[in-house]
Amino acid sequence: MYIHHIYDIDLCDHSGKILRMKNYEGHIIMVVNIASECGFNEQLEEMELCFQLFKDYRFTILAFPSDQFNQEPLDDDEIVMHNEARFPVTYPLFPKVMVNGKQAHPLFRYLTNALPGFLGTQSVKWNFTKFIIDRTGKPVRRFSPITNMEIVSEYIANLIEQQPR
């Protein structure tokens, strides 16, 4: 199935309820793949600060745990409990997904196609890769896991200025 627009993609929450990306129309969105045993896990706290700073400007973060890089051994319920204990976040945290390959979630297939990585590769290279989507639903920027969250936050602030609510 070919996806024409990001708002055509469906997501599934922890209860199994279908959520539509269309629900986020008009928002600036950061999609990120996370893993509880990744060395970049402290970014969860930094991402929460970013979310709190910009959420009133119709900004959200959608976090997707993934064991694609063998750093997420927990099941979905354990991931939620782990994050509540160590890095509590208030932005949406979804069930585990694949981010690469034939079994990759459609959202990540769409984003890696729209925003190829280094040397044009259409895969996610590591946990905490961040994809930014503007208010029109267009993927506009991809940040590597090593990019400082201050740089990501500055980019989001500029996008908010360019695309007011």
Image (tube, rainbow, N blue to C red):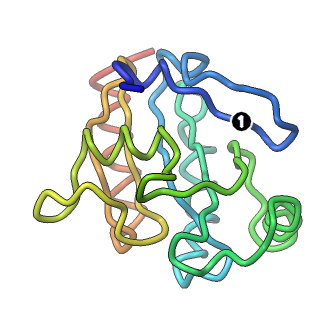
In the picture, the quarter occupied by the C terminus is: top left
Q: Residue furthest left?
A: 119
Q: Residue 119, image x and y in percent?
A: 10, 64
Amino acid carrying label 1: it is Cys
Q: Residue 54, image x and y in percent?
A: 53, 37
All told, the count of numbered labels is 1
Q: Residue 106, image x and y in percent?
A: 48, 39
97 in relation to 145, above or below: above
In the picture, the quarter occupied by the N terminus is: top left
| Quarter of the figure with residue 152 | bottom left
Q: Secondary structure at mark 1?
A: strand
Q: Nearer the viewer, residue 99 or 39?
A: 99
Task: Name the residue rendered at 72%, 78% in the picture.
Answer: 73
136 with respect to 89 (left or right): left
90 in relation to 21, above or below: below
137 with respect to 158 (left or right): right
143 in relation to 59, above or below: below
Task: Name the residue rendered at 58%, 64% in the picture.
Answer: 34
Q: Residue 144, image x and y in percent?
A: 32, 65
Task: Name the residue rendered at 64%, 60% in the picture.
Answer: 65
- Are there few (<14), some (14-19), or many (20+) residues within 10 Å of tag 1? few
The residue beneath circle 1 is 12
91 with respect to 160 (left or right): right
Q: Nearer the viewer, residue 50 or 138?
A: 138
| Quarter of the figure with residue 151 | bottom left
